[in-house]
Image: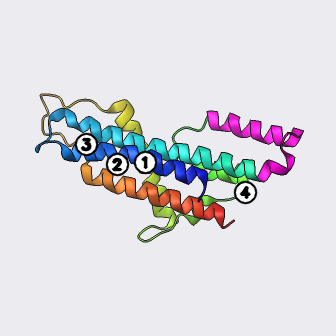
Amino acid sequence: MSKALNSFEGSIKDAEDLLEHFDAMSKPPPANAEVLKRASLVMALTAWETYVEDRVREEVAQRLRVVNGSYVGKFVAGRLEDELKRFHNPTAEKTRKLFHDFLETDVTARWEWPNYDSAKAKKTLDELISKRGDAVHRSKPQAASAPNMPHLVKRDELEKAIRFLKSLVEATDKALLEK
């Protein structure tokens, strides 16, 4: 197990804890409880983003250990850090490119587990990243004039998203360990 995977497991727990707080609320939950589901989605996808960053750092450091401190080692490590400063919203393509550029591995090709193939996993990740953007930047409290508007993040979809991200991290880690 990679250190990044171990760290992810602690981070994704925050998203699960927020979902548990939502579930523990009185039924029906108050109108402002929607924020817990949005926050849980943001935390879950932040855990994914951090995993990707940590995992590529971990693997690059492992591969560079023989040239650590040399011009080449410093150059590659510096380029990686520069790239990670711009690495936001880790879509399938951005993740594929990062791992390919620094590790010559297309991890997205190995994103397969029961009920998911690579194409479906990529599409699902991209949809979740988009929803995270909406949850952060576009989500407004329900207006009094539209009290029956559906919530951006539905409880069952959030639970499914957390399970998906856990499987995605496991598949990514496995792809790198088997390389």
Amino acid marked by disc 1 = Ile
Front residue of 43 and 145: 43
Circle 4 packing at 10 Å, graded few (<14), some (14-19), many (20+), is few
Residue labelled with disc 2: 16
Task: Assign a secondary structure to mark 1.
Answer: helix
> Which stretch is magenta?
63-85
Q: Which mark is residue 110?
A: none
Residue 9 in the image: above or below residue 174? above
Mark earlier in primary sequence (3, 4): 3
Q: Residue at x 33, y 45 (%)?
A: 17
Residue labelled with disc 3: 21
Amino acid marked by disc 2 = Glu
Q: In whole angstroms, how far apart are the C-alphas of marks 1 and 2? A: 6 Å
Mark earlier in primary sequence (4, 2): 2
The verdict on residue 75 being magenta is yes
Circle 1 packing at 10 Å, graded few (<14), some (14-19), many (20+), is many
Q: In whole angstroms, how far apart are the C-alphas of marks 3 and 1? A: 15 Å
Q: In whole angstroms, how far apart are the C-alphas of marks 3 and 2? A: 9 Å
Amino acid marked by disc 3 = His
Task: Assign a secondary structure to mark 4.
Answer: loop
Q: Position of residue 66 (x, y in %)?
A: 85, 51
- Look at the numbered discs 1 and 2 and tell me whether their residues touch, using CB distance below 8 Å: yes
Q: Position of residue 115 (x, y in %)?
A: 41, 70
Report the predominant secondary structure element of the magenta stretch. helix
Q: Residue at x 13, y 39 (%)?
A: 148
Mark 4 vs mark 2: in front: 2
Q: Is residue 170 left or right of residue 56?
A: left
Amino acid marked by disc 4 = Glu
Task: Assign a secondary structure to mark 3.
Answer: helix
